[in-house]
Image (cartoon, coloured by chain):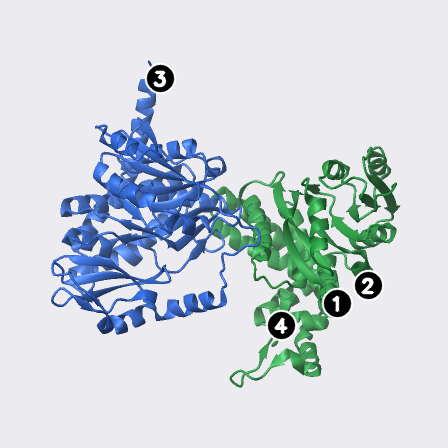
Chain colours: A blue, B green
Amino acid sequence: MATAVLDLDLINLPSEITGLTAYLKAFILIRFKGKPIGKITVPINNGSIRVEQIYPVIISEVEPILKKVWIKDFLGWDERDKIDFTYPKATIAICTRDRPEDLRRCLDALMQLPDDGQEILVIDNCSSTDESKKLVESYGSIRYIYENRPGLNNARNRALEEARNEIVAFTDDDAIPDPSWLRALLRNFNSPLVMCVTGMTMPYELETEAQEAFERYSPFGKGFYRKEYSLNTWHPLNTGKIGAGANMAFRKEVQNAVGLFDEALDAGTPTESGGDHEYFARLLLSGYTIVYEPDALSWHRHRRTWKETKKAIRGYGIGVYAFWMRLLIVEKQLGIPKLAYTWFIRTQLPNVVQSLLRRPGSQPLSLLVTELQGCILGPWKYLQSKRRIKRNHLYHDSY
Amino acid sequence: MSGAEMIISVIIPTHNREEALLQALKSLSVQSFSKLQFEVIVVADGCTKNTIEVIRSFKAPYKLQIFEQEASGAAAARNRGAAHAIGSVLLFLDDDITASPQLVESHVNAHQRAENQVVIGYLSTVLKNQKGFFGRKLIMWWEEIFDAMKHKSHLFSYRNLLSGNFSLSAQLFNSVGGFDASFKCQEDYELGVRLIEADAQFAFEPEAMGYHNEITDLNRWLNRKYSEGKAAVQLYQKYPHLIDSIPVIKEFVDGIPPFYQRALQFIYKRKLLAEREAFIYNYALRVAEWLHMFQLWEKLLGRQQTYWYLRGMVDSVNDLNILMNISKRTASIQNKFPSIKEKDFGGESKTFTH
């Protein structure tokens, strides 16, 4: 049975939420004055929620963070406030491939953003039809670029190249950014060392069991606390917790600082994912700071069927090991094997054991096994991907 | 100077770095601020004849004075420059700073906004030859210092006064008595202490920007740690009540931790052996970098730094007991100044940090 996704602000709580007859549970994002501070899951009785009855759940979830948020709001103090800060201008880049329906929802959401002079750029990565192109043209103000080299990282590189503004904010075509998303990201570019800011991603819908399992297994949201990652505070090769490609922004000059995204990684190549996390690692290794900003909220539509979800999880397994392979052989990072060992012993293996013992709260075994399969394939997939690129270059060069 | 009032004097101490200095003087030729309203004073501290000739041959479009003195340190050189300055504001720059075109103007504007101010300018680090881990670490280290000052609610401490790019009124400078020339390192922090005690307002001005041509390599860096260790003891001896803000020494407040006791005694008694060990660490650092193992490299560097800092502390006193008795001395000082102890919270006494 499906889970309803709701969004409540403590400042403006309704007394009752009705019309939820199709659902048994509700996933609720709690905000305080627009700022996301927590998420809860509560049961639904007879299609409605009496908000009074979920107060205890709300309180136990948000109490520690609300104290901090409230006192900062009361004092008007913010750790991001710098004396010389002005908002930089941004280009929003959406990399898409054959998903016009999702793209429309994403673009509609971007139209709700306050106009700070941002530019919107759609990079169409080898779509087989011209539906996306027609859709983008119907909006008028959006730039459309067709990128004919397949691969998400190729599309990202193209976006960095084509962007006309200082900051390039990436969103996936299946994500729906909140109206305050862009400003929240931009606000953190307040030091020359901050080269990247990532945002928080919540599920847009939890209509199927597969979507619920995905959200439980690998949530895109990385917590409600803002965090600064740098060499001084974080292991630079362990970038899974920093954020995700669906919701991240860079300075355009990042390409001069650490180079382009690796075209052998991520969707559209045999490695399926990992391009974003590999790039984060390279940034940290070069001494830059990455900020995780939960205020930069976006909603992601997870894959609806089990088949797609399993493929995605397997892809993550492949991606992690593929990007570690790159860090090992290209960047010569010899700490990788130790990291892989630690992940297996401390996380993956205990998860499998828990699942076999059917402990409450354990993950579905099939997903865990799929991910492990992906991990084993990862390094070879990376090499395969590299070979394929080399072959294509040779092929193109001979003409 | 027909009619135009001399507003600001730029004072640059230099020690045999003519190339860097020439670049600094050139960058001052293209200021947005009127060339009739600022002067530049170079104080050559223990420079060779060659260096002085090079400086003298520079054709400046502004009023340029050059003074020579026997090698006696940057603090003495700055005092000498200040004594000859006629501007109402003194701007101290280091000889490895290339000024941005708005640097002088931004300092002047900041002083017009409020009185009794110490204006600290931003320095953007430009690396010369440092590659790899050390270069990264250097940039992060500098940027974090300035980043902290950029926060709107930053509480300034004497340790925010960086001598590379700051300005204050000549009157304020003279009223606190200028730099203490007995400090060969951290003379800026020492001045900062007296400025804060004189109720000067510290302000950070990001637009007063200069490019810092950083030539520090690993050896110079460790050398600096050594000098900092020496300066830390000197600073503590002059201002014992600042103990809570001096690295390493602050950990001696409630008795010296056993690690430091052993380390200090070892360094004091077996100097040669300790030196050899440090030498080996230098190689280990290189190996760690060659293996691309940052975490290990950082750990090794941390130990090296600690060693040279402690070594500086040991070398600055002739009797180790002076260091070993820091905690007793502090206790007696804290009893003399009960106001720095806070007793109202939960019965347990807490020491405030300056």
- Mark 2 or 3: in front is 2
Mark 2 and mark 1 lie on one chain; the one further toward the N terminus is 2
Q: Which residue is mark 1?
A: B198
Say whether mark 4 and mark 3 are on the same chain.
Answer: no
Residue underneath mark 2: B175
**How many numbered marks are there?**
4
Report how far apart the C-alphas of labels 3 and 4 lie in the structure. Answer: 68 Å
In the rendered image, residue A241, in percent from the top left (x then y), is placed at 35, 53
Label 1 element class: loop
Q: Amino acid at mark 3?
A: Asp
Question: Mark 4 = which residue?
Answer: B252
Q: Nearer the viewer, residue A350 or A46?
A: A46
Q: Are marks 2 and 3 on the same chain?
A: no
User: What kind of residue is marked 1?
Assistant: Ala
- Location of residue A178 with respect to A330 vertically, above or below: below
Q: Amino acid at mark 4?
A: Phe
Q: Label 2 is found on which chain of the structure?
A: B
Secondary structure state at the residue bearing disc 4? helix
Distance of mark 2 from mark 1, alpha carbons?
9 Å
